[in-house]
Image (cartoon, coloured by chain):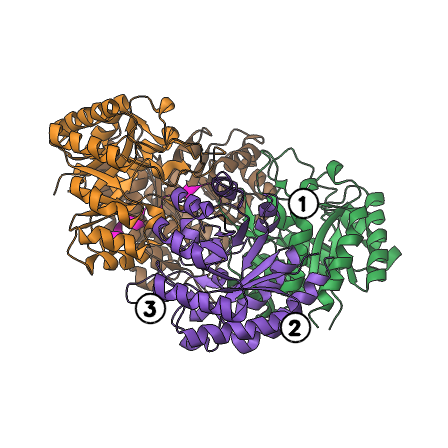
Chain colours: A orange, B purple, C green, D brown
């Protein structure tokens, strides 16, 4: 089969140095394990729970950092867009354009992204069934032949909690798209820490193992050298020095499915 | 107490004639019943389930129709915006700016709307607890003193279904904002009709009665002269000739709370 | 229309004196307000969250207390059974036999209760849709013509939380049974207080008003002279001296539906 | 590590021959794969959705079949009890006593089962969080030292649907009990087929793989030679001739965790 895709990086571009460090370490790990690596970071966290939270360097500065990583390290890069007006600049730099989960039904944004011809990393809304992603895929495919990756990141389960319904992997694969499991956002507790989202880091590894055993094409992870000091999504990030051990098991489990 | 606010109109601006007819009829009914009336219609349905669905006349033409209704009939008008770039034009016409539920955490959009100084009709995301709306309100209040109306329109309850948790009314009132019940979107079955959302029109009246008895400051309703032929949200719209009977009961129930 | 039915009493039979006091006060209130009153208390709480919780006086002693109240005060009495073997003794005393929500699919218990010919107060499981209660009703009706009352007491909504879906009232009425709203168990937070269930007393009144406005035939309430000292379900009980004010509003709202 | 436990058999004892055939085939497969096997079947399905459904041979006849299988084939047997009065007879035959999910909070039943000293296979209610199973375990442990196995069989997710929250495995393991995944009941659609529960057989294998990768101590499965003709739970049963292929993958995945 194809190698597992790994989309990973810090939640947000905190500094160019941190971004390069994470990208470099992940690239090495993926090289050792035979994974296909894409660097991910957000230039702007446009939907933080609270106003006071760190948002990132913004579009221009952030894309410059992404371009630097891409060129210096020869690694493809992905980031997320929030309004149609951001798409042209983003597409000039990014290899893959990501649509945030809350925005997966915004027709204009989906179509603006599709117009670029770039592959789209489309997160499934926490409020949507996996089969309803067929309509979001159609909105993209109607514009051009962009490759669409579908990302599971948990479904609403009462208040301030998400559940990962692993039936979504076979369901979304039926839509003809590679399926990615977002191993770190799926363990968020939205709003669960008062003015920000809490997270359950201890469940990242078992759920990631489960997802790969259920059958996925890629994993998405937020990785940080020091999650407890991360400026975004620390509670649900993986420490950089713990990633390789988790991925080794993931790779072994995946080989059992062949 | 203050009179109940009624925000009502067709889901989307199908034609200027239809919009004026609905606005006129609703204005008369609200006059007879002592309700405060605001006309609502969308100029663009930017997040329809499927691509093939009718979206509306678009920003410029739609706002012209809204302005016409406002001026000719002396009725305040509200419509929804989807990207920050739409906000200035919208604010030039609208009395109230509405933020769609899926977008209630998009900081830029909330702040762009707040900058106008107009009151904001803020729908609670189907994926959010009522207490988490505190953060969305803060994002608006931090910019200026815009009045914020908070709208309950149902919470995710498994796939393709919504439930109205009526505890949300007292919870959101604690945030210091008037609370509105969206009586028609709350009975949607998202994606439940295949390529569009289904609806359970038969539950509109009992749930609206329940909401007013629980304690709300306003009602939001999609109204159409012929719901079965509506170009959007027909399955969960109320027929124009059935509205008055429902509202009469609503008004009577509300008077019991005083 | 028929007068509203009120099923009310302490959660569990703490002492004969307390039970008589509650029954007497409720009987007076219901007389003043024109409500049809049934006294309810459990002789055994067979499914408390934790082992250490108070369970009640047991079958024989509890039924004797119920019989005493019934005879002395001329008020019908209802209590719940948990195993088929309890049914004959219970039916010798009770006017109505109640089936707990967790047990609403236990065929033997339903049929044992139905065999007595007594009316059955059947709670809807927190895990069941309102339309699935049709099968539970059939299990009873197949045995004899017992009248079945269907009780809404909340549905699972994530962990440690319940939501009241008020669509259940019209749905269950379609099954040909009177529909009761359990206003106090519906605000439980199951397991939410560690070793026992928490409760949100502040939501009892708004949700009860909402239910009666949506359309119900009866209300069920746990009432206690001092809820903070109740041996069971205190967090979701109403104080005896606050009941009449709530019921007055309920009666007024109900009169608006005629 | 310890070998994986496999609890498997037909949903209900349809006939002694069918039961022996399933037990024999499963024993052979488990021998080949190094799994620890326990035969499971119900003597009475006491909580079928509808009255007309097949319930099984009943207590006496059913236990005789179970005893026959146990003695002839030297395989431990488990079955479920529904009222305390069944426990003594059941304990005289069964190696493990199972408590159904709906009944996991019934204190008397739990304690009657615990009194026998037999290990208890305790299903987590569809309405309970995994951490709330601590209280059910306490109810058993307070009586004697019975070993308790905790079984995940899905959580309520809206109406007529269940979701498997794989966080429950590490959570319940923290309670000091082996954790079992019920791979076939977890794909039920309760009430989803009108008068009976539907099922999604296609998801049994991916979810079972996921569970074993997440980390479990045992699997529970309903197995039938011809699921489409099974008298109970056919839609969510595995065909006998497809079991070995699924278990081979399960065993391989489990070996990756060591």
Report, in whole angstroms, how far the alpha carbon at label 1 lies from the one at label 2.
Answer: 35 Å
* Vertical position of residue B230 compared to residue C60: above or below: below
The secondary element bearing badge 1 is classed as helix
The secondary element bearing badge 3 is classed as loop
Q: Which residues are magenta?
A: A159-172
- Name the quadrant of the N terminus of chain C: bottom right
* Vertical position of residue D64 compared to residue B201: above or below: above
Residue at left offset 28%, top offset 63%? B51
Residue at left offset 16%, top offset 42%? A92
Quarter location, residue A10: top left
Residue at left offset 21%, top offset 43%? A89
Q: Which residue is mark 1?
A: C202
Chain bearing tag 1 is: C
Between A166 and C145, the one nearer to me in the picture = A166
Is A167 a magenta residue? yes
Quarter location, residue D194: bottom left
Is C166 a magenta residue? no
Q: Is residue B165 left or right of residue A230?
A: right
Q: Tell me residue B145's x, y (percent).
A: 54, 43
Given the current orientation, which residue lies at the most extreme right position?
C72
Report, in whole angstroms, how far the alpha carbon at label 3 lies from the one at label 2.
Answer: 34 Å
Q: Which residue is mark 2?
A: B32
Neighbour tally class for label 3: few under 14, some 14-19, many 20 plus, Cα within 10 Å = some
Q: Which residue is mark 3?
A: B54
- Name the quadrant of the C terminus of chain C: bottom right
């Amino acid at each position: 089969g194809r190698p597992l895709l790994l989309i990973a990086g810090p939640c947000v571009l905190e500094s160019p140095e941190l971004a390069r460090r994470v990208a470099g370490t992940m690239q090495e790990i993926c090289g050792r394990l035979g994974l296909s690596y894409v660097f991910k970071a957000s230039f702007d966290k446009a939907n933080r729970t609270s106003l006071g939270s760190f948002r990132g360097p913004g579009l221009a500065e952030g894309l410059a950092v992404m371009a630097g990583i891409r060129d210096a390290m020869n690694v493809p890069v992905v980031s997320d867009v929030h309004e149609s007006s951001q798409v042209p600049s983003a597409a000039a730099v990014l290899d893959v354009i990501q649509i945030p989960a809350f925005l997966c039904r915004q027709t204009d944004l989906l179509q603006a992204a599709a117009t670029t011809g770039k592959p789209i990393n489309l997160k499934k809304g926490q409020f949507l069934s996996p089969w309803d992603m067929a309509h979001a895929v159609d909105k993209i495919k109607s514009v051009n032949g962009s490759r669409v990756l579908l990302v599971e990141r948990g479904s609403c389960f009462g208040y301030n909690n998400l559940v990962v319904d692993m039936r979504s992997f076979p369901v979304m694969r039926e839509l003809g798209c590679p399926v990615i499991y977002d191993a770190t956002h799926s363990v968020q507790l939205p709003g669960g820490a008062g003015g920000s989202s809490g997270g359950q880091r201890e469940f990242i590894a078992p759920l990631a193992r489960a997802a790969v055993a259920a059958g996925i094409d890629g994993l998405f992870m937020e990785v940080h050298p020091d999650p407890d000091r991360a400026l975004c999504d620390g509670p649900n990030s993986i420490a950089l020095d713990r990633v390789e051990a988790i991925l080794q098991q993931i790779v072994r489990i995946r080989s059992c499915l062949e």
